[in-house]
Amino acid sequence: MEGYDSMNYRVTSTQGQFVLKAYQQNQRIIEVIKAENEVLKDLEDNSNRYPKVIANSATESLTFDNAHPDQCFRLLTYVTGTFWGDIEQPSATLLRSYGRFLGQIDHQLSKLNPVAIRAKRMVWDLDHFLLNEPLIEFIDCPHERKLVDYFFLQYKEHVLSQLPILRKSLIHNDANDWNVLTKDGEVSGIIDFGDMVYSSLINELAVGLAYVLMDIDDPIGSAVHVIQAYHLIIPLKESELDLIYYLIAARLCTSVCNSAKTKREKPDSDYITISERPAWDLLGRWISISPYRASEAFRKACGYKPKRIQTSSEALQARKKYLGPGLSLSYDRPIYMRSAAFQYMYDSEGNALLDAYNNIKHVGHCHPHVVNAGRRAMAHLNTNTRYIFDSLTNYAQHLLSYFPDELSKVYFVNSGSAASDLALRMARVYTRRDTMAVVKHGYHGNSSSGIEVSHYKYAHKGGSGRQGHIIEAELPDCYRGKYTGDDGGRLYARDFIEINESATIGAFIAEPIVGCGGQVPLATGYLNELYPYIRSQGGVCISDEVQVGFGRIGTHYWGYEGHGVLPDIVILGKPIGNGHPMAAVVCTDEIADAFDNGMEFFSSFGGNPVSCAIGKAVLEVIENESLQQNALLVGNYMMDRFREIQQYYDVIGDVRGAGLFIGIDIILPQSDKAPNTVLASVIKNELRELSILVSTDGPSNNVIKIKPPLCFNRANADRLVEAFQEVLNRRVT
Ligand code: PMP
């Protein structure tokens, strides 16, 4: 059998079975093998738990043979037992035996200190995990690569600074499922000491657990048994327990990185990639487990008190002391967030919440490509557009490549509100008109001019009503509105044109799918009819893509493309920076020229090098991970599943949207589309208790809003739909 640095043969003779190991020799290998042999001799007892070194006829433990001048050989006893890897779901007793066994061997190894092994520096040593970073590029699948990249980032964040203070010892460093042997429900032996290193002691457990937890139903519960039993032999420190979650992930990453490299170099090698599939499975599951839940469970297993952190009500009280009361909180029981990974968010209670709501984290929370781009840029240069720097020009060019030639200029700002404010100002300067047409229930920003064009704000509580220069268009809603047929779009537009025939409109602003209006797609044909009219009477058309842009709707990159129209000005925000505060206005040359009327346009932060690096990274991730396509596939799949269950629940009035921008309209039972605000709120809050995040919106706040990060997958969609159904089953009789 092929190993990383040896060929291994089973030798059967009249004296029993042995393992013959053949190495390509060099001085370093010889020194290490000699040291390994010394360790095995020191470990030797009557238990047959470890291989014993068999000396050759010259009583030497290493054999050189003239017939094979490049090689050296050694013979070990054959340790018998059932491989851990052949056990389906290990029992608690077996898991505890595993922990005890590791504790015992580490206790023995802690007394040894072979110099040749101390000098080893290898990729399989978690203290040197970062040596594996260059191997990430061997991973072909971008969805897999990002997971590994994420855990490298977490290692740097959580482990690196701790390395100097973690206690070190000689460790076996490879208690994997094909090295550990069992007999009669107990761990009975361990083989292959070739990975022994002098490293942080806690790495022993992390390495072992990475394999033990593969293919296991309850990884944290199982890990607890192992850790608890180990702790009884070698008491673990709190600081060590807090790192296990990240170290397990690091070992899984080491395994998949090296498998990926080997697959490129030796495509036929089965042995070396043996752990690959289960390692990927566990890594994929690992992000759905909260690191805080894991470390609390491990601390508890060792008798430590939970880490004292503020409760959410304490944190809320502190927040209220310093922040204005106008800020709202989601859910009846607000969430105290601690960190996040892709489509998961980790709260202070140890939950991993499935995020089906935060569209801003477009490519996934804390995406490593985006985080690293921002970090690097921040360490390099941060300045403003009054200087020339390449990242601004390059990013502008890259972003504009997603637009047709007509939309050829971009201005960068720092929020969707600043972008809509700027867009409106441009429209005013260009058309020399002040009248703005807006769609009812739309929202475009929190600036004064943003509120002026946001019916969602000015027409509701605290709003001061429609201002004189604002013209309202009915929401062209084909579910609940005046027109519901195929021709609805055209009819809504016709009505608007008829009513406002005498108006001189400067700009018409609308979202392609009206988010705050309850995820209502503008009726088909509406913009086709309205845009030419607005232009014919001298106005410009603004598409607010803050919510739906960057591939979210699946079929197209931009929402306006889904309507087959071309705006004069486009507003970009939220997803553009994956949470980094940036936004942009894209417009025609003509509008940009007119806007250059002598007054300088300057934004202190808009278009700074850090934002440009982040924006570029976001565009790259959308491409690399085919996220637009994923939005289409998973979005359609989820809507299909919702439509399936809609047949059984008459409270689901409508399932609508595009890609991963979905609305579920909740109505009163046996009613004619009467909004069911109470039930929608119940669904939102009960899903939250089931660790799934959605929101409600719409004029009656009865529409469940679903707009997850675009890495949301089918399994996530299944979980959401099934939980939704569970809540309805509880509530609907
Ligand atoms: N336009 C739309 C459609 C929005 O949804 C929002 C934010 N909800 C904005 C503009 C304003 O963006 P920001 O909150 O970044 O100022």
Image (cartoon, rainbow, N blue to C red):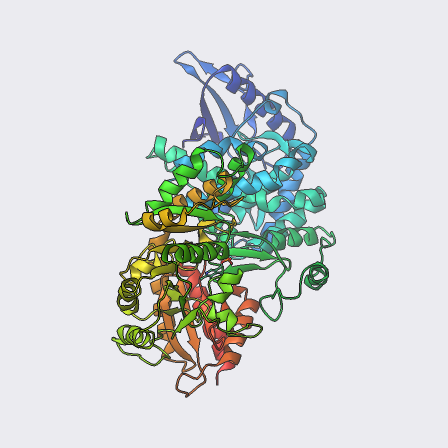
Position in image of residue 261 (x %, y %):
40, 33
Would residue 603 be visible to someone looking at this image? yes
Residue at x-position 42% and y-position 60%: 715
Q: Which of the 4 quarters of the picture holds residue 464?
A: bottom right
Q: Where is 525 relative to 170, above or below?
A: below
493 left or right of 249 in image: left
Task: Report the residue that reaches farthest toward the left.
Answer: 487
> In the shown orientation, is residue 332 left or right of residue 666?
right
Q: Residue at x 39, y 46 (%)?
A: 410
Name the foreground residue: 564 vs 594.
Answer: 594
Residue that extends furthest to the bottom in the rendered view of this protein: 670
State whether residue 220 is above or below residue 485.
above
Query: Which residue is located at x 49 percent, y 29 percent?
Result: 15
Q: In what quadrant of the picture does the N terminus appear?
A: top left
Q: Nearer the viewer, residue 445 or 165?
A: 445
Instruction: Using the image, determine if residue 442 lies above or below residue 619.
Output: below
Residue 96 on image: x %, y %: 63, 50
Residue 604 image point, x, y percent = 54, 44
On the question of residue 272 being in view, the answer is no
Tally of numbered tags: 0
